[in-house]
Image (cartoon, helix red, strand yellow):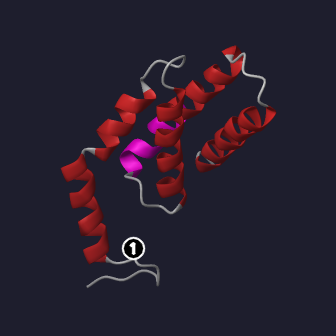
Amino acid sequence: MGRWGTEPWANDPAADWLDELFDATRLVEQVDDALALDLHDDIEEIRIAAHLLCTLGEAGLWPHEHLRRQVWVATSRLEAALSFRVDTNASLIASIREQVEKLQSLLG
């Protein structure tokens, strides 16, 4: 068994299990689908997909071959949502901006 750290995911069996989970759930594809939803009607779904991507990406658990592209798409979608939102909820706007910053940090 290969181990490269002490985290629960830092070993070969865990990595294999995650690969199987991503395949079985089509999670990468589901995030793609959510990120393509309508910005006006489905911003909540877009945000939670971006959050999942960010959370698993920060931990190094998101499939690397998809991470950069999906982070770019998520960032672009959230920035577009900010540009047209008429919502005056300052907390919501700040939260979306914070989410964009976290996503951008994954791009290095």
From the viewer's perspective, is residue 89 above or below residue 7?
above
Q: Position of residue 9 (x, y in %)?
A: 39, 73
The residue lying at 45 percent from left, 45 percent from top is 67
Left or right, residue 2 beside residue 64: left
Q: Bin the neighbour count of mark 1 within 10 Å (Cα to Cα): few under 14, some 14-19, many 20 and up.
A: some
**Residue sitting at x 31%, y 68%:** 15
How far across and how far down the image is residue 88, in percent? 78, 23
* Residue 85 vs residue 13, the one in the foreground: 85
Q: Is residue 39 left or right of residue 4?
A: right
- Determine whether the residue tagged by mark 1 lies in a helix, strand or loop: loop
* Residue 52 higher or lower than 84, as above or below: below
Please report the residue visible at 72 percent of the width from the left and 16 percent of the height from the top.
86
Residue 79, image x, y percentages: 65, 26
Residue found at x 60% / y 44%: 103
| Relative horizontal placement of residue 6, taking residue 20 as reference (left or right) | right
From the image, tell me which residue sits under label 1.
Answer: 9
User: What is the quadrant of residue 93 in the picture?
Assistant: top right
Q: Which three-letter amino acid code belongs to the residue tagged 1? A: Trp
Coordinates of residue 99 in the picture (x, y in percent): 65, 42
Q: Which residues are magenta?
A: 64-72
**Residue situated in front as seen by the camera: 59 or 91:** 91
Please say whether residue 68 is visible from this viewpoint. no
